[in-house]
Amino acid sequence: MGRIKSALEIALERTESVRGDKASIDQFEAKQRGKRAANEFLEGTKVNLGDEIKKTPPEQQEALKQGVFDVLLSQITLPHGEDDLKRLEAVGKGLALIIGDSRFSSLYKQLNGAFSQYLDESSRYEEAIRRQYAPKLRQKEEELSRRFGRRIELDPFQDAEFVAFYNQSMATLKGNYEAAVEEVREQALRLFNRSIPLN
């Protein structure tokens, strides 16, 4: 009967041949620093992405930029409210710095305009949906008032039929703008990949 090995012994045997490559560890750490710097930049702390790149050794700058780029690219989404516009503007500035191509800056400026237009149109859509559904909602309120013998007021979002109608209408609006967001993401990726020299 053979000797039973502990989990630690088995793990050590399996990882025996794995040795850390200093260069790849440095690249990984630079990418993580880039991600942290991008998050701090978006939080509004005094992080200057240009300074972070300059402070980084030349052989790690690509990895740092990749980390920053990954975080910022993931932030290009449709805004949920006016508060998001400031964050999205910072995303564009950070990406423009990392990409270093004036075509991206002008493209993102157009997208920022589309973001504002989306918020305006979104609030107009919501008002129109509420107006369109109001007669049906009043009818339901009157029916419930008769049934319970007292005045009943319904919030439209308590009504499943309204919620379904609202979600369908807003999804249509969102779909129109999502295509522009996706196009900017793809363009950013293409321009970023061109800005990094091939190894």
Image (cartoon, rainbow, N blue to C red):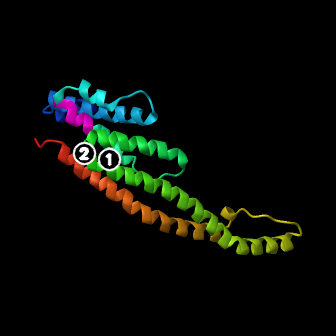
- Spot occupied by residue 189 in the image (x, y as percentages of width and height): 26, 50
Q: How many marks?
A: 2
Q: Nearer the viewer, residue 124 or 61?
A: 124
Residue in view at x 47 percent, y 63 percent? 174
Find out whether the residues at labels 1 and 2 contact each other: C-beta distance under 8 Å. yes
Figure quadrant of residue 166: bottom right
Figure quadrant of residue 87: top left
Q: Is residue 58 left or right of residue 147?
A: left
Is label 2 in a helix, a strand or a loop? loop
**Where are the magenta residues, as a range?**
59-66
Q: Is residue 54 left or right of residue 81?
A: left
Is label 1 in a helix, a strand or a loop? helix
Q: Is residue 32 left or right of residue 39?
A: left
- Spot occupied by residue 56 in the image (x, y as percentages of width and height): 23, 26
- Kind of residue sitting beneath label 1: Ser
Residue in view at x 62 percent, y 68 percent? 128
Q: Nearer the viewer, residue 169 or 6?
A: 169
Q: Nearer the viewer, residue 187 or 3?
A: 187
Which quadrant, please, contains the C terminus? top left
- In the rendered image, is residue 10 in sight? no
Which residue in the protein does label 2 denote? 101
Residue in view at x 81 percent, y 73 percent? 142
Q: Nearer the viewer, residue 104 or 31?
A: 104
- Spot occupied by residue 59 in the image (x, y as percentages of width and height): 16, 30
Question: Where residue 73 is drawn, which disc sits there?
Answer: none
Q: Is residue 114 left or right of residue 187?
A: right
- Spot occupied by residue 54 in the image (x, y as percentages of width and height): 24, 27
Does the magenta segment cover residue 166? no
Question: Where residue 105 is drawn, which disc sits there?
Answer: 1
Whether residue 136 is situated above or below residue 109 in the rendered picture: below
Q: Which secondary structure is most common in the magenta stretch?
A: helix
- In the rendered image, is residue 155 in sight? yes
